[in-house]
Image (cartoon, rainbow, N blue to C red):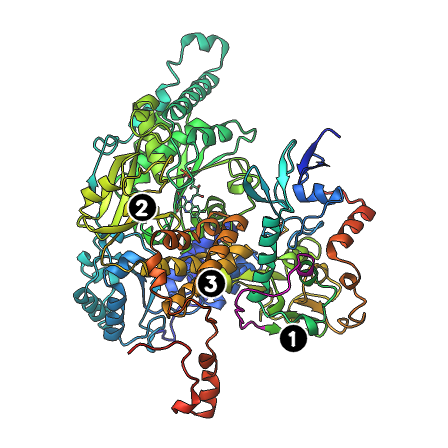
Amino acid sequence: MKPAAAPSIQEILEPILLRYGGRPDLLLQILIAVQKKLSCVPPAAIAALAERLAIPLVRVQGVVSFYAFLSTEFQGDYAIYLSDNITDQMLGSRELAAHLCGKLGVSLGQVRADGRVSVRFTSCTGMCDQGPAGLINFRPVTRLTRDRMERIADLVNARVPMEDWPGELFQVETAMRRSDVVFRRPLKPGEGLRASLERGGEILSTWAEDLAPSDARKHHLERGGAETLKEIYKSGLRGRGGAGFKTGIKWQSVRGASDPERYVLCNADEGEPGTFKDRVLLTDYADMVFEGMTICGHAVGARKGILYVRQEYAYLEEHLEGVLARRREAGLLGENILDSALDFDIGIHFGAGAYICGMESAMIKSIEGRRGIPRQRWPLPVHHGYRRKPTVVNNVETFAAAAVISARGGEWYARNGTAESSGTKLFCVSGDCERPGIYEYPWGVTVREVLRDCGALEAQGVQVGGPSGTLINAGDFDREISFEDLSSVGTMMVFAKQRDLFDAVRNYAQFFRHESCGLCTSCRIGTTLLANYVEKFAKGYGSPVDLEEMQGIGQIMKTMSHCGLGQTASLHISDSIAKFPSIWAGRMRTTEFIPAFDLDGALAEARSLTGRTDADAHLPHPVPQEA
Amino acid sequence: MTNAFHLDGLEVPFQEGQTILQAALAAGRYIPHLCWHPDLGPHGSCRLCTVVISGRPFSSCTQPAMKGQAVACRTPELNGMRKAIMQMLFVEGNHHCPSCEKSGNCRLQATAYDLGMQDSHFPHQFPKRERDMSHPDVFLDRDRCIRCERCVRASRIYDGKDVFGVHGRGMHSTLAVNSPSGLLADSQIAPEDRSIQACPTGALMAKRVGFVVPIGERVYDREPISVLELRKYAAEEVHHG
Ligand SMILES: Cc1cc2nc3c(=O)[nH]c(=O)nc-3n(C[C@H](O)[C@H](O)[C@H](O)COP(=O)(O)O)c2cc1C
Ligand code: SF4
Ligand code: FES
C-alpha cells in the first residue's frame, strides 16, 4: 500500500494545518481531515499535532479516543460502517453484514490482512426510511440488499476508486411524504430575513437630526431585532431538539447579555436513532435553516453562527458550503446583509461519531475541538456558551421554524398546533410501515393518524421520540404528540405484530452503553449494568429479581445522572416492562434468581490451557435446556 | 446574613457565588462528595452530592446556592441512591480494600462506610486495566481509579504539569498519562505533586509510604469521614468561591 515514496506525516499534515489556520480549537476538524486522508490518525500524527498546536499529547489522544470515527489504527482503504439501528436490523442488516463480510473475506470489526477493507457497525446513520444503510469512506449507502452488498464487495475487491462507483449506491431520498402549512409553501431565500429587517421600520429622516447615519442604521437594526423577537415570543415556538424550551426566552437571554460577543449555534447532530428530519432540512431547505440562524443573529445581536453537523451527514458539506456561498453572493450573509447594518456569517463544523455531542454543552466542547463531555449545568450556554460567550443553541428544525415565523408572523404560526405546542412538527417515520419518511403535521396529531397515513396497519407498538423517548403499545395510539402529552423529537419507529420487541430493547441498551460519555457514575456504570442484564435475559437466564434490579438501576440513572443521556437511558427498560411484560416473562425459565456469572464459561481459559475439549471438562448447564 | 436557604428544613447561610455544597460544609452540614475538592473546584461526575430542589435533582457541588431554596439532601431515598452509586463504583473497578495501601486513608472506602455500604450488591465487572509501576517513586493502579479527575485538575492547576488526562469513552474511559510512552516514568510527575495527594483512592500513590502508618490508626479508621470533614472545615474556616 505504502511504497517508499509515500509522503511523510509532516507532508500530509502541512496542507491540513494550513487549511485550518493551525488553530488548536479546530483540533477535531483537523483530526477528521487526517482520518479521511489516512484512514486513521497514526500515533506519529498525534504527536506531531500535539507539538504543532501546543496541546498536551494526552489531550490530543483523548480526543481521538473519544470519537467513534477516529482511530489510531488503520481502518483499511475502504472503511465500511453499517448502521446498526433496530430499523436497519429489521430490514435484515445483520444478515447482510455477514454476507458482505463473506464476500470480502473479512471478519466483522477487523481490517482485512491486505489492508484493503474493514466492516463494522455504527450507531444509526439517519437513513432509517431507506435502510439498511451504511457509510463507505463516509459516503452514505442506502437500501442495501444482497445484490448491492455483492456489488460493493466486487468494487472493493477490484479496488475501484470511490469516485468511479455507480452513483445509485449513494442515492439518498429526501422527499416529504406529507406537508402541512409550513412545507406546503416553503420560504424563498431572503423572505424571512427581509421581514425581520423591515421590522426596523423606515430609517426616518428625523433620526438623522439626532443621530449620525451609522447610528441611525444601528438603531434601525436594533428595533427590527427586538420586533422579530416579539414575533418569536408570540409564536410560542419551542425547541425541536427534545427539551422543548421556549425559543423566545432563550433568545432574550442572549439578547439581554452584557457581553457584545455572542454566538448562534445550530445543532445538526441528530444522533437520536430513528431521526432524520434534520438531514432532509439540510438537504432541501438549507436556506431556511441558515436564514433562521441569521434572523437569530439579528434578534440577539450575534455576528457569527456555526452549524454543527454529525459526521454521518458530512457528505452534505459541498452542498451546504454552496448554499452559504450563494447566500453571501445574494447579500443574505456576510457584511451589511440586504444593505442593512447587519453583519452575520456562518461556518460549518463536523462531529466524528458521538451521540452525546447533540447535548448542547457537549456540542460546544466538540466545536471547541475537545472531547464531547457535557459541561457543568451552570452557567448555561446562554450566559457562557461557545468561547464562554453568550450563545444560542437551537435545533435545525427550530431555526427553520423561526425563519417561517419571521416571514409570516408569530400569530399565524401559533394558529396551528395545540395550546402549549404551537405550529407544526416534522415526523420521522420508520420501521414496519408501507411509507416510511418525513411527515409534517400540526402538533397534537394522534399516533393513530400517523400510523394510518404511513400505512402501518399491524402495529403493536411505537418507539416515540427514539430510544430516549417513550415506548407505547396499542392502548396509547390515541394519545397526541405534543409537549402536553407525548413529547417527541418527531421520531416514530413502528413495530408490527410479528416483531419481538425484545430485540429493540436490546438494541437500545447496547446503544446507550456505547454512547455514554463516561463522565458520571450512574450513567457510565448504569448503562453497562442494564445492557448486561438485557443480555442475561437474551440468554434465558433472567428472573423476576433481575427485572426489579433493572428498574432500580433505571431509577438511579434517572435521578443521579448529569445529563439527559443518562436520565433517559433506562426509559426503554421501564417502558417495555410496563407495556410489553411478555417479552421479559418469555425469557425467564424460573421465578428464582439465577446468577449471571457463568461458572462454566469462566473455566474456558483453564480448558484451553490444558487442551481439554471433552464433556467432562464442562460443568452441567444450570438451566434446563429444551429439546 | 440575609442570604440563606433551607437544607433538609434547617437554615443554611451562604455568600454570593457559593455552591450549595460549599455553603453546607461551611455551615457544618455534611453532604457526601468524592470528585469535588475545595481547592480544585467541582467536576460533577461522581454524583454523590446530588440534592433535590423543587422535585428536580442537582449536583450540589455545581449548583449555586439561591436564597429561599428548599434543598432535600439526607432523605432515605437519596441516601439509598448514594449508597448504590458507591456500590457501582466498587463493582466497576477492582477494589481490594483489605490489602490496599490506602485502606483507612481512602475517601472511597470511608465514604462507603459512612453511607452504610456493606456489600457491593451489583455484579462485579472485573475489568482488565493496566497498572503503571514504571516510575521509581510513584505508581498508578487503574483498577482503583474512579475517574473523578482530581489528579487531572490538580496537575494542571497546582503542579502546572498536565500529567494526566482521560482516554476513551463510557466504561472504556481510562486515566491516561501525558508522556511519549504513556508511562509515568517518562512523565513529569514527582512524588510530592499535588496530583498524588488529590487522589481519593489508592489509584495514584507515592511508593514506599503506603504502610508507614499502620492500618487501624489511619485517618478514617479513627473517625467517620462525615465527622472529620466537618471538623476540618470548621478549623480551616475555609472561604470558598
Ligand atoms: C444526549 C443528548 C443528545 C441530544 N441530541 C440532540 C441533537 O442531536 N439535536 C438537537 O437539536 N438537540 C439534541 N439534544 C438537545 C440539546 O441539548 C438542546 O436542548 C437543543 O439542541 C436545544 O435546541 P432547541 O431548543 O431548538 O431544541 C440532545 C440532548 C441530549 C441530552
Ligand atoms: S449522563 Fe451519561 S452522557 Fe451525560 S454526563 Fe453522565 S456519563 Fe456523560
Ligand atoms: S461531588 Fe458533586 S458530583 Fe462529585
Classify mark 1: helix, strand or loop. loop
Q: What residue type is labelled 3?
A: Val
Whether callout 1 and callout 3 share a subunit is answered no
> Pointer 1: what residue?
B134
- Sequence order check, earlier mark of 3 and 2: 2
Q: Is residue A437 visible?
A: yes
A568 vs A320, nearest the viewer: A568
Whether callout 1 and callout 2 share a subunit is answered no
Q: Position of residue A127 (x, y in %)?
A: 27, 53
Q: Report the span colored magenta.
A: B112-130
Q: Is residue B229 depicted above or below A587 in this figure?
A: above
Q: Label 1 crowding class (10 Å Cα cut-off): few <14, some 14-19, many 20+?
A: few
Q: Look at discs 1 and 2 and give the one toward the viewer.
A: 2
Query: Residue at the location (46% across, 71% down)?
Result: A596
Does the CB distance between marks 1 and 2 fall below 8 Å? no
> Pointer 3: what residue?
A545
Distance of label 1 from label 3 (alpha carbons): 45 Å
Is residue B127 magenta-colored?
Answer: yes
On-image quarter of the C terminus of chain A? bottom left
Q: Label 3 crowding class (10 Å Cα cut-off): few <14, some 14-19, many 20+?
A: few
> Pointer 2: what residue?
A491
Query: Residue at the location (34% across, 69% down)?
Result: A76
Q: Is residue B218 depicted above or below A332 in this figure?
A: below
Q: Look at discs 3 and 2 and give the one toward the viewer.
A: 3
Does the CB distance between marks 3 and 2 fall below 8 Å? no
Q: Position of residue A149 (x, y in %)?
A: 21, 66
Q: What residue type is labelled 2?
A: Thr
Displayed quadrant of residue B177: bottom right
Instruction: Output the chain of dot 1.
Output: B
Q: Label 2 crowding class (10 Å Cα cut-off): few <14, some 14-19, many 20+?
A: many
Q: Where is residue B91 in the image (x, y as percent from the top left)?
A: 56, 66
